[in-house]
Structure formats: structure tokens, C-alpha cells
Image (tube, helix red, strand yellow):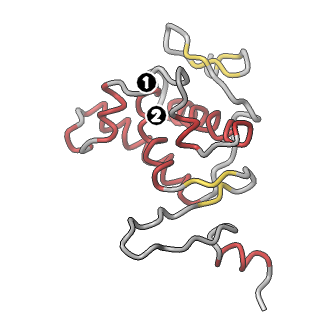
Amino acid sequence: MYGFDELVKLTNGGLVEQQVPGAAPIPKRVSLQGRNVMVDDNDLEESKRIIFSELSNVGTPDERKQEARHIINTAINRVPQKKRDLINVLRERNQYQGYGTKQYNLAAGDSAKLDAPGAEKMKLVQSIIDEMKTGNFPDTTKGAAFYVHQPDGKLVLNHKPLFK
């Protein structure tokens, strides 16, 4: 007899999925703990592209990591509101200035072809994606669903600058 936690693990977070013979493999789905949001490999790939294209070059590495967390957390917070999966929230019209840009497309390519600053940025972005894959990815925004990039590159969240 299995307990609730074991059943959740056995059923991939409560979703029972069957593989159709000859079909593409079903992406692994991970539940973001305490968030009521499931993500799969497609969501994570799109998250990587959006974070990379939206992340500024302002601040220390720790500040930039915090900025990256805030960017993706605001999208995750919109998933239950919109009743859509993460990839579709990220692809909504007029949501991200970086969507479809050169930076967005660079994030989809071979990271070995990035220049030194781009490679460092990708390393930071990939650390966020790797953390999301574990399912342990807390909300750093206190439930915020949006942020604003000011012309000087600073991020404003809940009407307050992220960094001073």
C-alpha cells in the first residue's frame, strides 16, 4: 500500500501519462513545490530563452541571479491565473521585449559559440533552469505577476526597484 507522497512520485506529480508507440517521448514533468505549477522540458527550454533575452547586464552576479529568478517567477505566478502552461504564458503576445530577438535565438543555439559575457550569462541562466528541474524553486517575488525594465536597465517589481 502506497501513501499519498509515494503515489504522487509514482504518477509524475499526479499526472498519469501513457506513451503512444512510435510517438515522440513525453517530456518529463516536474511539479514546482508549493506553486501548483507543472513544468516540462519544453517549458524549461522556453524559460531559458526568455530569461537569457530579458536579463540585463547590470549589477553583480548575485543581483543578476536574483533578477533572473524574478523574471521567471513572475511568469510562473501567472500560470494559475491564466490557466495555461508556462510555455504559453511565456509566449503570450507583448509580454517580453526579448521574445524572438537575437538574444532569444542565441539562447537556443550552441552555447560554445557565445562570447565571454554571453557564456557567463548562459551559465547563470542554466543554473536557474537546473534549479527549476529539481522542483524546489521558491517564489522570490511575493506573488508578483509582472515586472518592468526601466530604460536604465533596472528591474522594478511591485513599484520598487529591485536594486538600489
In the displayed structure, would residue 77 be above or below residue 29?
A: above
The amino acid on which the numbered mark 1 sits, given as a three-letter code, is Gly
In the rendering, at what x and y percent does residue 89 appear?
58, 36
Pointer 2: residues within 10 angstroms few (<14), some, or many (20+)? many
Residue, x 67% and y 41% (percent of image)?
79
Looking at the rendered image, the quarter that the C terminus falls into is: top right
Pointer 1: residues within 10 angstroms few (<14), some, or many (20+)? some
Q: Pointer 2: what residue? A: 50
Q: Is residue 98 left or right of residue 76?
A: left
Looking at the rendered image, the quarter that the N terminus falls into is: bottom right
The quarter of the displayed image where residue 66 is located: top right
In the rendering, at what x and y percent does residue 36 appear?
73, 52
In the rendering, at what x and y percent does residue 90 appear?
53, 35
Kindly state the secondary structure of the residue where label 1 is placed: loop
Mark 2–mark 1 CB contact (< 8 Å): yes
Q: Is residue 107 left or right of residue 89?
A: left
Q: Nearer the viewer, residue 50 or 152?
A: 50
Q: Nearer the viewer, residue 132 or 47?
A: 47
Q: CA distance from mark 2 to mark 1?
A: 7 Å
The amino acid on which the numbered mark 2 sits, given as a three-letter code, is Ile
Residue, x 47% and y 55% (percent of image)?
41
In the displayed structure, would residue 4 be above or below residue 81?
A: below
Q: Is residue 163 left or right of residue 3?
A: left
Residue, x 62% and y 70% (percent of image)?
12
Q: Nearer the viewer, residue 144 or 78?
A: 78
Extreme residue toward the top, this view: 151
Q: Pointer 1: what residue? A: 98
Mark sitting earlier along the chain (2/1):
2
Residue, x 63% and y 50% (percent of image)?
137
The quarter of the displayed image where residue 146 is located: top right
